[in-house]
Image (cartoon, rainbow, N blue to C red):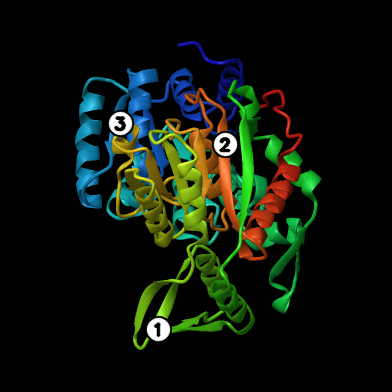
């Protein structure tokens, strides 16, 4: 199959360097490009690190686009079992003189004894899929990947969201890709590009030297946004909902005093971060209540659930709909709203994996926990997508948007955002928008320079 024009440019960019990042929008074919890089550089020993949910997707992509490469997906079993399987399959591939690609999730890869073995192999090509997963400079996985990467001849990062929170997110990724770019000290990097202040001078108050950062990233980054795709239109609609007087009182009490009283117990927040979580949970209608020594989930409002039910009633009964939410209580609300309109519903979350059944048409409504369903899945069966809550991660949010609006989608897409008026919901969406503007300011204008040695 012929590469698209932007894919051909990406492959040429990466093959001219020992290290590169594909900052390419969801659906633009990053995986296909990575496999073509492997083919053109004649890589024999390939290691792909990725989220667990996309290990199987890599296996199918290898079989489709690079069938001469033996795919060795490590999906099931203990870390020790995965190591035994990898060793056995690698031995077979080498016996037949074939290149191979071990595909494993980040957490398993760094765990002993598999991690110790992987660091000794000296891979020809290391692919870091969804590389923003190693953005945390002090994270165990990020530090381990940085050490592993130095044993690999060529390194390639794939991401649609290199800066899910701030420009500082690039440090951990490029420490693995090209450590000479920013060095090994995150403190020094932060001092260069962040304006510090606040409590003990340890809070990021703003950013600086962004033009310099952009120029450095451009040396290793190929960028292609989703404008290269011929996709149908996408429309965003915010539906404002009003909390009931009771829920509004609880919200205001919790926001002001870090505590609120309900008939069955007390809602408390130990600190500001927990308060934000509780406030967002409350706008979705259910909240964690302390009842003696127990914690129970209590319903305090049905405004969003009712709004979702009204929307479903306006759609044909067999119309596929995806509904994202941050909390398990959001998913409960989806199922109850669907049931109230006579619709069957399925779920994709940490506890229920019913995506394939939904894709097969066994139910029109799919309730998706945003952190479980944002990466590596295809939701193009639906053209209608709803959000009861989003969380605070720009990366998770943008990934979720692209699950519905991607190649394979043939109809215009409509996103419905249910936002409780004058609450944390409005602040969350504003923060996601503002954070995106900061990220775009850094990435905007990154050119794809002529390859240099």
**Farthest residue in the top direction?**
2
Q: In which quarter of the image is residue 26?
A: top right
| Label 1 element class | loop
What is the distance, in whole Å, between disc 3 and disc 1 at their CAs?
42 Å
Image position of 292 with respect to 159: above or below: below
In the image, is 197 to the left or to the right of 396? Answer: right
In which quadrant of the rendered image does the N terminus lie?
A: top left
In the image, is 87 to the left or to the right of 49? Answer: left
In the image, is 73 to the left or to the right of 439? Answer: left
Residue pointed to by mark 3: 360
* Dot 2 alpha-carbon crowd within 10 angstroms: few under 14, some 14 to 19, many 20 or more: some
Query: What x and y, as percent, mark residue 426?
Result: 66, 59
Choose between 51 and 368: the one closer to the eye: 368
Choose between 24 and 331: the one closer to the eye: 331
Query: What x and y, as percent, mark residue 42?
Result: 43, 20
What is the distance, in whole Å, between disc 2 and disc 3 at their CAs?
22 Å
Residue 264 marker: 1
| Label 2 element class | strand
């Amino acid at each position: 199959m012929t590469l698209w024009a932007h894919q051909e440019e990406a492959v040429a960019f990466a093959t001219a360097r020992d290290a590169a990042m594909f900052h390419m929008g969801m659906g633009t074919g990053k995986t296909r490009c990575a496999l073509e890089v492997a083919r053109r550089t004649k890589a024999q020993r390939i290691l792909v690190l990725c989220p667990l949910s996309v290990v199987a997707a890599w296996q199918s992509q290898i079989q489709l686009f690079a069938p001469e490469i033996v795919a060795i997906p490590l999906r099931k079993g203990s870390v020790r079992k995965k190591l035994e399987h990898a060793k056995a399959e690698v031995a077979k591939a080498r016996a037949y003189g074939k290149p191979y690609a071990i595909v494993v999730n980040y957490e398993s890869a760094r765990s002993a004894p598999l991690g110790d073995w992987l660091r000794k192999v000296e891979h020809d090509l290391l692919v870091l899929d969804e590389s923003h997963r190693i953005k945390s400079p002090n994270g165990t996985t990020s530090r381990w990947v940085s050490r592993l990467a130095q044993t690999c001849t060529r390194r390639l990062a794939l991401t649609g969201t290199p800066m899910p929170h701030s420009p500082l997110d690039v440090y951990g990724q490029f420490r693995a890709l090209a450590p000479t770019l920013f060095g090994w000290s995150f403190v020094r990097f932060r001092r260069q590009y962040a304006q510090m202040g606040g409590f003990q001078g340890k809070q990021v108050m703003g950013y600086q030297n962004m033009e310099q950062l952009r120029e450095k990233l451009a040396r290793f980054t190929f960028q292609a946004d989703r404008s290269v795709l011929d996709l149908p239109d996408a429309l965003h609609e915010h539906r404002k909902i009003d909390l009931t007087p009771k829920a509004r009182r609880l919200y205001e009490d919790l926001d002001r005093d870090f505590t609120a009283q309900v008939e069955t117990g007390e809602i408390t927040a130990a600190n500001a971060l927990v308060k934000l979580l509780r406030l967002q949970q409350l706008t979705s209608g259910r909240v964690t209540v302390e009842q003696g020594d127990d914690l129970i989930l209590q319903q305090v409002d049905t405004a969003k659930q009712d709004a979702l039910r009204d929307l479903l009633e306006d759609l044909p009964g067999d119309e596929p709909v995806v509904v994202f939410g941050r909390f398990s209580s959001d998913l409960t609300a989806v199922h109850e709203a669907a049931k109230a309109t006579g619709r069957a519903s399925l779920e994709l979350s940490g506890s229920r994996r019913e995506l394939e059944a939904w894709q097969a048409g066994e139910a029109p409504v799919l309730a998706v926990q945003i952190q479980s369903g944002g990466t590596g899945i295809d939701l193009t069966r639906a053209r209608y997508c709803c959000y009861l809550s989003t969380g605070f991660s720009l990366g998770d949010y943008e990934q979720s948007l692209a699950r519905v609006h991607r190649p394979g989608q043939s109809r215009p897409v409509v996103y419905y955002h249910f936002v409780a008026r004058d609450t944390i919901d409005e602040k969350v969406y504003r923060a996601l928008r503002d954070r995106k503007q900061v990220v775009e300011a850094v990435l905007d204008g990154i050119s794809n320079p002529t390859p240099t040695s």
